[in-house]
Amino acid sequence: MAKRVFSGIQPTGTLHIGNYFGAIRNWVALQEDHDCVYCIVDYHAITVEVDPQVLHDASINMALDLIACGIDPERSILFVQSAVPEHTELAWIFGCVTSYGDLTRMTQFKDKSAGKKFVSAGLFNYPVLQAADILLYRAEEVPVGEDQVQHLELSRRIARRFNSRFGEFFPEPTPIVGKGARIMSLADPERKMSKSAGEAHYIGVMEEEASIRKKVRSAVTDLGPRGDEMSPGVANLFEILELSADPETVAELRREYAAGTLMYSHLKDVVFESLMRVLRPIQARRAELVAAGNVEEILAAGAEKARRIARENMRQVREMVGLFPCAR
Ligand code: TRP
């Protein structure tokens, strides 16, 4: 039996190449030999304030992006979290086997709540819902970016505590971290590429070619002398090159760098071209999907498949915990 994989992505914000190389490309590859469940996590998105119409459109846009990137809704289950109410149901039960102290140590919570006037309890409970997402399908492997490793550790603790209290039911899920998880901002190569840092700090997967060219061309390459070490900006360009170009091209440019003959303008041109060779077909595929106009049907079918698994697992969980069966 193929192992079950689960992963989730928030719908709000733009899908950038850090997400693509760090996680989504992995999601696509895993479809070959795993039983994959991929979820657009809109309940996680409402842990901070978001306009309802914006949220709804973002979920649909994220589905288009993911399918364009190669998620195949025939082979994998692709759906929106809120279409399967068992996620929040399991999250409540998990909240009761999660240590408050553990939640206070989550670095993502500390980062996201720092300096905020209003911090929701939902933001605090975010990792509990994430554990519910994964374990609702009894998934064993979770492709994520590096920043999610701590949340996965907590998911394992939750599974363990549930199992020891109520009986063996959940596997302990392990993260699969993508190679490209360390793409940095082109404008500030000492911080991670992210959508929250602003326009200049990320390259969107669906971004217009002219805009991507501009961002690559103006990438920061030098931050003052650093001895023999490659500057973070140049290292970052090589990182993107490694992820998008063929090995010979990378090796050639590395030789030039070592010989001291590499022009950064040339490096940038090659990075741009290699990146566009990855992105162009994805962008074209997305345009086709928009034209086909059936993404909402695809999501509804995905949610139906997901719910069949979720409903059965929750039936068993209710029984193990001593809760009542669902009313009809
Ligand atoms: N917290 C994840 C992120 O910010 C998104 C997410 C929610 C997720 N539920 C998940 C990822 C379950 C993996 C598995 O990237």
Image (cartoon, rainbow, N blue to C red):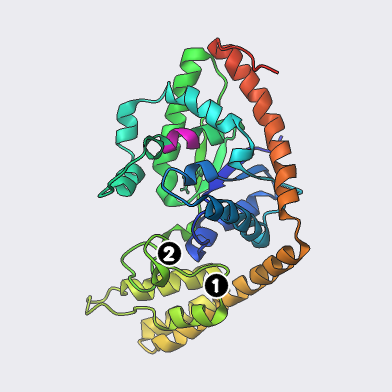
Percent across and percent down for residue 55 are 54, 51
Question: Tag 2: Cα neighbours inside 10 Å, few (<14), some, or many (≥20)?
Answer: many
Rendered location of residue 301, percent (x, y): 75, 43
Is residue 153 shown to the viewer in this render? no
User: In the picture provided, is 166 more to the left or to the right than 228?
Assistant: right
Closer-to-camera residue (113/224): 113
Question: Callout 2, which amino acid?
Answer: Ile
Q: Is residue 182 magenta?
A: no
Mark 1 or mark 2: which comes first in sequence? 2
The correct choice, above or below, for 18 with respect to 33 in the image is below
The residue type indicated by label 1 comes to Glu
Q: Which residue is mark 2?
A: 183
Q: Residue drawn at (43%, 21%), measured in percent from left and top?
A: 96
Q: 200 or 275, which lies in front?
A: 200
Residue 255 position within the rendered picture, expressed as x and y whole percent measured from the top left: 43, 81
Q: Is residue 129 magenta?
A: yes
Residue stretch in magenta: 126-130
Q: Quadrant of the N terminus?
A: top right
Tell me if 184 is positioned left or right of 231 in this view.
Answer: right
